[in-house]
Every structure is written in structure tokens, then in C-alpha cells.
Image (spheres, grey):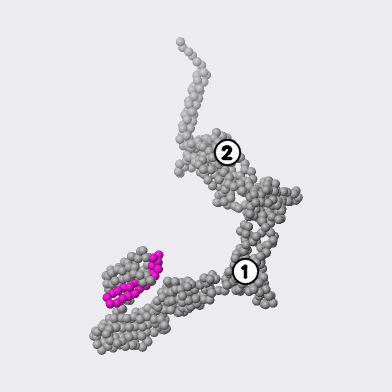
Amino acid sequence: MKCFISAEIFLYLIKIQMCMKKILTACFILFVFISKSQAQATANAGLDIELCYLDTLNAIGSGLNTGDTGTYQWKDLLSGVVYSNTSLLKLRIVYQTNRTFELRVQRVKNKKTYTAYDTMFVIVNALPTFMYAGLPPRCYDDGALNLTNIPLVKAFSGDKTVSTTDVHYYQKKTPSWISGGPVGSNPYIYNYKNFIQNGSLFKSGFRDTICYEYRDYKSCYNRECKSIRINPNPEVYVADGLYCIKQNAVSLNNLVVKPFNKVGGIESFRCLSVPSGSAANASNVISSVPTVPVAFTLDISAPFTSSSDGIYLVEYTFRDATTGCQRSDTATIKVVLEAKFKFNSSIKLCLNQGLVALDSFVKDSNNRTVLNGTWETIEFGGSRNRSIPSIAERLDSSIIGGKYFKPAIGSGMYLLRYTNNGICDYRDSIYVTVNGLPIVQIDAEDTVCYNSGLTPLINIIPAGMVGTWSGQGLVNGRFFDPQTSPHTNTFHGPYKMIYTYTNPLTACTSSDSLTVMVQTTPEYTAFANPVSGSQYTVDFGINFIKHVDSNALLCMWKFGRTDSTFFDSSFIKNIGLKSFTDSGDYTVVLYSGIGRCGRIDTFRFTLDYNSSVLQYSLASRVKLYPNPVKEILQIDVPENAVITVFDLDGRSLIEEKIYASDKNPINMQGIQNGMYLIRIEMGTETVWKRLVIER
């Protein structure tokens, strides 16, 4: 079967086929374009994040590589607000709803812009909250506050699923008045009393701040600070009272010393106890009269069986009506029986004593308590004649302020009268003897030589081994040791030595002092130089002079054989050329010094045809060190020797043999601190040295 179509329909079908080809071509081009666009740009906003309210969101997007040209944009999809045009999104979370942030990355390449998108979901957790129990104003005496055990605060997690009283308490100041912790282990204690005193608080109180903080299981953190007022407790002080039983009643208001200002306060008294054996009842011995202020009276008329004074113990309380803070103090009300005073049998004083409190010499024989009265001098040396100036002076000037006696007014016997007014009236008298001071006279050399040994300190009056000496350089109680001076200058000092003596009969003490100067002995090096070309001629002299003025130094030389008589030189430092008639062994004795202080050195001198050797004596070549010593003493000797250590009483403590070739350590352990003498025996020569042990 053949079908025929018209030319118009055929042309229409041809057009439809051409349109379909164009549509397919366009779709293919669009697909390629989209595929190429997606390949030309990427966006990575990162992982979703969970934060706390008021935290700072820090996110870094990516999509552009190094060298790329393009832009970033962060936008809140909920509000439509753009928060950043860089890869960094830094935003403080000030809202409490979850948000979605879109990162848009646009990349420009070959003048074409490619765009990619990514999102980040942010979960916002609520902050912890607190339930504050509140702190009413405190009184200072309430003391330390256990914040954990109250509990002051209860904390809730942000989602309200967890609650706890374990919060961290702190203060922003340093040092903090809150101690304790850590959370959950030890309670937190607010102890303001370690840092402020009640007396330093204003009447209106002191305002302080207590802070607390908590982090919940989602690590969300919150804190709060609350104020606390600390009100002062009133300063309360009530004085003790002393009354005669004949007075019958005592005004308690007069005993209140503090507070000074009682306006706005409430006062009260109560009796805590009455005298032993008293018929009084503690609950009704205090009465009050509703005056302004209220007058309180203690009835002390009830008799008691005790032979001593009766004691009422009274408590006074003052409460601030505004703050409710109060304090109490107790007073002892002593009720005196008929007074029976007892004086010391005699009073003996010394002329150099200071003012003497006379009340200490009189007691009430009922209870032995020192009482408070007034004194006056009514007689001196058996006379009351005021027409004699010396008598009048002592009667008028020996008592100061009615309480104190002045011994310095003069030695002798005084009759004093004591009057006790205001308790139970009483009057009596007592003799007071003022002894003169013992006479003291001392003597010692005012200048001593460094090498002169121990210098005796002499008390002429009183004589003998009585009294005591003190001062720098004192040895064995009664000697001055000049070798305690530093031995660096010509003179050292003055050293003050004090003598004190107490008369055993009067117990009065006097003292006197003197000063001692120490003159240093010279140190030098002696020389003997043979004269070239001259037989048996030697040049003698000294140099390297220390510790003294070399211009003032006097020297005297003595020469001779060891078995012959010495001959002297004049007082010169350098004797110069000295001629000898023969070779052999000679001894040279050199005296050197200034004034009364000097030294004598002996040298061995060997002379041959053209040479001479000058050697110091063995004594000058013995060395002890260290000195003072603590434990081990070293002794260097030029020859083998035997050493013996003596104390100042002559007792031998150590004896050892030592050798010229060794260091010879001597163990001084077990010997007490002090000064000792060491004898070094070398053949026919004996050397003495002084040693100090000091630890």
C-alpha cells in the first residue's frame, strides 16, 4: 500500500527535524559548559561545628589555589547577612539559635568567572546558668564562710540536664580572700578576717565581691560576681571595778569604756556569778531604770563568807539596732572587805635607780592584790623641818606624780605615807632607804705594744678578784690581749674596757671604763750584702718596712761571735758597711721600734772571704695556720721538733713530734673555744706561739 503526502507536509517535517537537531546541539553545549564550569571552581566550608553562646567562631574556607584570582564570601543563610569577604570567618556568637553559613568561591580564569558553593552548619549551645542563694549582710564576728557547704550557688548546664553545687569560687583581687578547692575535693572558704580588722571597717560596713564560675559537660563556661556586705561589730570594752563593800551599790554604766557613741544601740547587763558564799542571787542583783540611756545598778550589799574580796562577774552587751551586730565583754567587780594593808618590811634602793613604782610595795592583806593609792614624803633623815633647804627639797621632789619615788634625789632614809582613797579609806607609812653607790677606781696602761703579751686590768677600789670586766680583747676575765688588734697600722683603738662592781650588802652597782691603744710592732726584711772586692766587708740594713712610719723607726744593731761579747751600733736603720777581721760564724741582734714598742730579732751570720749569709732565727721561721683554727692546725718548722699545747692554766693538752719535711696537721677537735699557748722545742731553741680556737 502506497501512502502519498503533500509537499507542504513534507517541508514541515523537514523543519521539525532541523529544530530537534538544534535543541540537541544546544543541550550538549550547555552540558559541556556546566561541566567545564564545575571543573573550574570548588568551595570547601569545612566540617559542621558546635560552639557555645558568646564564643568566637573561627572558620577558614578553601577553594582558591596559590596564584588563582578570585574571591570568597561567607553569608548567614538565615539572616542573609554577609560576614566576611575573605577565606576567614571570625565571628562572635551573639545569638542563641543554630545557623547555616554559606561559603561562595568565585574563580576568574581566562576572563571567565566560575562559582562554587558549600555550607557549614553551626550548633549554638546555651551557657550554664546559676541559682544564687543570696548572702545577707554579715557581722564581722560571724567569721569565715564555707561557700561550698551553704551551698551559695547551684549551677545548671546550658541544656538544663545537669545541675551541681561544685562550682569554683574566686576573687579578682590579689591576694584572694577565698581559699580551698579544687572543685569537688575541698570546700571553698571565704575568710575575710585574715585580711581586715573589725576596727578598720566603716560604720556603714564594707562591700566585697565574691565570684564563681562553672564549665558544663559541653565545655560551655559562665561566671557571675555578687556583692557581700560585712558590717562591723561594735567595739565593746567594759573596765573592771574595785569597790568597798560599804558602798552597797555600783553604777555599771560608769564601767563602759567602749562604745563611745551609744546612739542607735541596745545595751544590756547580766550577772554571770556572785561571790563565793554570798546570799545574793545572780539573776536579780542587777536592776535598771528606764532613763535615756537606761541606768544599770549592781547591788553589792549582800554579805559573803569568803575572807578575801568578793568577785561579781558581769557581762555587758551592746547591739547595733541597724545591723544587728553585737559584742559582749565581761568585767570583774571586786568588792573589797574592810581594808587591811600590808607593806614590805623595808624598801632599799640604789642612788642610780630610775623611778620606782611605789604601789608595788603595798598589798591588801585580805587578798594580796596590789592596790592603787597616792604617796607623799613626810620625813627625811628623821627631820620634817622644811626651813632646811636640803630637807625641803627631798620632801617636795622625791615623789613624782604621787606614784613614783626618785632615788636620784639623794641617799638617806625617807619616811613615805600611803593614802588609799576611793575604795575603803586607809593610810599608813613606810621607811625607804636609798643607798649610795660603791666607789670604783681602776687602772691599766693606756698604750700597750702589740707584742707585749697579756696586759692586766686592775681594779684598785675595790681590790681583789671582785667585780667583772668587759670589752673587746678581754682574755681570762682580767687581761687585755693586744694581739686581737688587726696589726695593720701604727696604732689601733681605742679599745673600751668596762669594770662593773656590785656591793653585796646594798646590791648597788657602779661601773667605770678606760681606753687602751695598741701600738703595732714593725715588720721588715733585713739584708747583708758582701762588698765586691773588699775582704770581710758587708753592707747591713733593712727594707720593706710595714705597719709603722719608716722615718720614725729607730734601729740598733749588735754584732759579735756566738761566744764573744756583742758590740753596739747607733740607732740607725741601715748601718751600712761593716768590716770584720776574720771569717766565721757571727750573731746579729737587731732592735727596732718606735717609742716604747719594738722587737728584737736574732740572726745567724756566716762570713767567709767574699760572701755572707744572713738567716733569721728558728723562731721567725715557725708558722702556724690557720689562726684562729676550727679543727685542723698546720705547723711548719725548719727543724724536727716537739710541740706541746697548753691552756692558760698551764695544763698540757696535746704533745706530738713533728718534722721539718711534713705539713704536720694537728687535730684540735675536742678542745673548747678559747686561747691556748703552743711550745715548739727545736734542739736547743724553744719557741712559744699563741693559738685561738674559734668555731
Q: Is residue 328 left or right of residue 581?
A: right
Q: In percent of the image, x 48 and y 42: which residue is there? A: 69
Query: Mark 1 Cα within 10 Å, few/some/many (few <14, many 20+)?
Result: some
Q: CA distance from mark 2 to mark 1?
A: 78 Å
The secondary structure that most of the magenta stretch takes on is strand
Q: In percent of the image, x 58 and y 41: which residue is there? A: 150
Mark 1 lies on a secondary structure that is strand
Q: Does the magenta-highlighted stretch encompass residue 674?
A: yes
Residue that sits furthest to the top in the current view: 1
Let me know if residue 276 appears in the view: yes
Q: Quadrant of residue 445?
A: bottom left
Query: Mark 2 Cα within 10 Å, few/some/many (few <14, many 20+)?
Result: some
Q: Which disc is residue 154 wearing?
A: 2
For the residues bearing labels 2 and 1, Cβ distance under 8 angstroms: no
Q: Which disc is residue 53 wearing?
A: none
Position of residue 370 measured from the top left corner of the image (x, y, whole percent): 62, 60
Q: Identify the residue under disc 1.
A: 431
Q: Check disc 1 and give the amino acid type.
A: Tyr
Position of residue 253 measured from the top left corner of the image (x, y, whole percent): 70, 53
Q: In percent of the image, x 69 and y 75: which residue is there? A: 386
Let me know if residue 514 appears in the view: no
Q: Quadrant of residue 422?
A: bottom right
* Nearer the camera: disc 2 or disc 1: 1
Position of residue 94 measured from the top left corner of the image (x, y, whole percent): 58, 40
Mark 2 lies on a secondary structure that is strand
Looking at the picture, tell me which residue is in the foreground, 659 or 294: 294
Looking at the picture, tell me which residue is in the foreground, 269 or 105: 269
The residue segment tinted magenta is: 672-695
Position of residue 695 measured from the top left corner of the image (x, y, whole percent): 40, 65
Q: Earlier in the sequence, mark 2 or mark 1?
A: 2
